[in-house]
Amino acid sequence: MKRLVWTLVTVAGLSIMGCNLGTKYSVGGTLTGLSGTGLVLQDNLGDNLTLESNGAFVFSQGVKNNEAYSVTVATQPSNPTQNCTVRNGTGTIDKAAITHVIVSCTQPGRFAFAANQLSNDVSAYAIDSATGELIGVGGSPFAAGTTPVALAVDPNGLYLYVANSGSNDVSVFSIDSTTGALTQAALPAATGSGPDAVVVDPTDSYLYVANLASNSVSAYSIASGLLTALPDSYTTGSEPASLQIDPNGNFLYVTNFGDGTVTVFAIDTTTGALSEISGSPFTAGTGAVSIAIDPAGTFAYVADESAKGISEYSLNATTGALTPVSGSPLGAGSEPECLAVDPTGRFVYAANVTAVNQIAAYSITPTTGALTLSGSPTAAGTLPVSIAIDPSGSFAYVANDNSNDISVYAVDVTTGVLTPVALSPFAAGSEPRAIAID
């Protein structure tokens, strides 16, 4: 009798396993930045999905357990022409649906915004797509909080977030997609003390603020541009001055000016909560003031203002850990204020390096991430403190704090060298501290 029971149980178990083998798991994620038409995604060269709006998406056909998925762009959008890229798009199903694919669409910059810390406002400009020149938007400048020092445009290009160091809050503006004019979209969201940097995650789900005076990061969920504070704030090193999120949306990097370190948090993509990773904080140079990450999420660079250098790291996309590149740090010759990587991942641009009031381009060695000065540095205004690269990689924009203006450069796509465009620099408000491109 016992032998018969054992046989029946075994057969039943095999039957259940057979049913599981037929189960398929969905593959999906989040689309941001789409403004054109005709975008088609494809999974495993056969499952096509046409998307017309931003937000969550799911392919109609599932994928069996232990089988691979591979999400690609089959057709890029047009009207306007855009370039959409896929992150977290490949892997193997492991008894769970895939929800973390990120598809980001960009186009040449339409508008530029500068935070003017002494005049407590934001200058807004339309960008001439052919020349890169800036044209003042009607109604500009727009009143912000007290001492606006940092800006972030959401991945869909609909909202501008402004960190106000003096009033300890974040202003939320909606962006007119036709004119670039700003309208207050909500009451300012309270932050910690002395907010100095702000960043939005690639899925447009969460916003994070570095609070310089309270040594913390504040976190918020985003719904239609509106911010809701998450329950916890997170302790950083001394004087957190800048933030970056890796392209996959998994890790938040915080430079700590006061102790020359980088704190790294893992991001819970379901809740937005942060947890410090093993090995954090990582050593940088004194006065770590800015961080930039390449589009592939392979390398990271930190501007060490007081040490007059640039720390170079390889980035582990699985753990978030930073490992210094051989030869790091790179001497900058002056006090670097800000770094930015171009959209191709070939060049790093540094403000106030090689000599005071200069901008330099460094080429990235693809195999190691080491930097090499490319061409001759270019003159900027007085105290260039923030640099932003147009999403097309055609133009660079630099906020000059002490000369109250914005320098604009055409980018040589071969060498990365910058050449001032006609009429540059363009007037801003009093002490422009940060610049962002939509």
Image: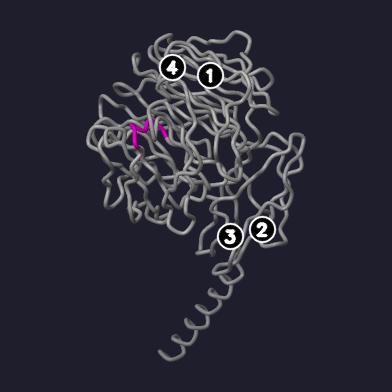
Residue 393 position, x and y percent, is: 60, 38
Magenta: main secondary structure equals loop
Give residue 9's position: percent from left, percent from top.
47, 81
What is the secondary structure assignment of the residue under circle 3?
A: strand
Residues tagged 3 and 1 counted as in contact (Cβ below 8 A)? no
Residue 94: image x %, image y %? Answer: 50, 64
Q: Can residue 230 be seen at all in this image of the molecule? A: no
The amino acid beneath tag 3 is Tyr
Residue at image mark 3: 25
Residue type indicated by callout 4: Pro
Which residue is at 61% across, 20% downward?
134
Mark 3–mark 2 contact, CB under 8 Å?
Answer: no
Check disc 4 and report the residue beneath it.
Answer: 188
Circle 2 — which element?
Answer: strand
The reply to whether the C-beta atoms of the residues labelled 3 and 4 are less than 8 Å apart is no
Residue marked by disc 1: 173
| In-front residue for pair 427/205 | 427
Residue designated by label 2: 43
Question: Looking at this view, is 399 or 55 the one in front?
Answer: 399
Q: Amino acid at mark 2?
A: Asp
Q: Nearer the viewer, mark 3 or mark 2?
A: 2
Q: CA distance from mark 3 to mark 2?
A: 13 Å
Query: Mark 1 or mark 3, which is nearer the start of the sequence?
Result: 3
